[in-house]
Amino acid sequence: MRQAQTLNEAQLRRVLHYCRSRRHPVRDETIILFSFYAGLRAKEIAALTRGDIFDDAGAVREQFILAAAQSKGGKTRTVYLNQRLRRALAEYGAGLPNNNPQRPLFESQKGGHFLANTMCQLFLDIYKAVGLKDASSHSGRRTYITRLANKGVGVRLLAELAGHSHISTTQRYIDVNAEQLTAAVELL
């Protein structure tokens, strides 16, 4: 099976620009940002509730616990949110009509949680519309792990952030390209 394409900054900007033209622009852009800046799987994004992300005062949390039932591996883990994603979530949250903590963070057309497959389809529709034929719902996750690795974050820390039990799984997510190889030999 082919691995999902990692996206460069220009491709991500193109995806986000396209999201702004969709029927649910802020929701769709925030979903994409969640994938790229928290490294969550489509299933995990679909399962999020407002209470996971917003505290009782409506402020965006710096981190939250992803419950075992929400994750692929059935393991609880802490998810850390960077400043860019927290700003996007604050903007998204300001537009939500009902801040009931039990409500889905991202509501489907019918007002409930996205199904994992429906969330995957949303990603595919967006990527196809901007001409990224090898991108999938896993592209944000692969890009997240690859970018952190490129910035010198160790594989053990990456595995913890990704929720992987084995670093060998995490290593398969890290893309290597000619630019990285060129930079590596210049370290000598």
Image (cartoon, rainbow, N blue to C red):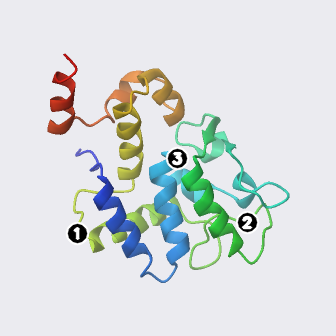
Q: State which tag comes first along the sequence, 3 or 1.
A: 3
How far across and how far down the image is residue 27, in percent?
Answer: 55, 71
Q: State which tag comes first along the sequence, 2 or 1.
A: 2
Q: Quadrant of residue 99?
A: bottom right
Please give the name of the residue rendered at 35% of the width and 60% of the height, measured from the top-left corner.
12
How crowded pointer 1 is (Cα within 10 Å; few <14, some 14-19, many 20+) is rated as few
How far across and how far down the image is residue 130, in percent?
Answer: 27, 71
The amino acid on which the numbered mark 2 sits, given as a three-letter code, is Arg
- Secondary element under disc 1, as helix, strand or loop, is loop
**Labelled disc at residue 103:** 2
Label 3 close to label 2 by CB (< 8 Å): no
How crowded pointer 3 is (Cα within 10 Å; few <14, some 14-19, many 20+) is rated as many
Left or right of 171: which side holds 34? right
The amino acid on which the numbered mark 1 sits, given as a three-letter code, is Gly
User: What whole-number distance in Å separates the C-alpha atoms at marks 3 and 2?
Assistant: 20 Å
- Secondary element under disc 2, as helix, strand or loop, is loop
**Labelled disc at residue 131:** 1
Please give the name of the residue rendered at 79% of the width and 61% of the height, measured from the top-left corner.
58
Mark in the foreground, 3 or 2: 3
Q: Quadrant of residue 45?
A: bottom right
Q: State which tag comes first along the sequence, 3 or 2.
A: 3
Residue matched to label 3 = 38
Q: Nearer the viewer, residue 147 or 74?
A: 147
Please give the name of the residue rendered at 52% of the width and 79% of the height, measured from the top-left corner.
24
User: What whole-number distance in Å separates the C-alpha atoms at marks 3 and 1?
Assistant: 24 Å
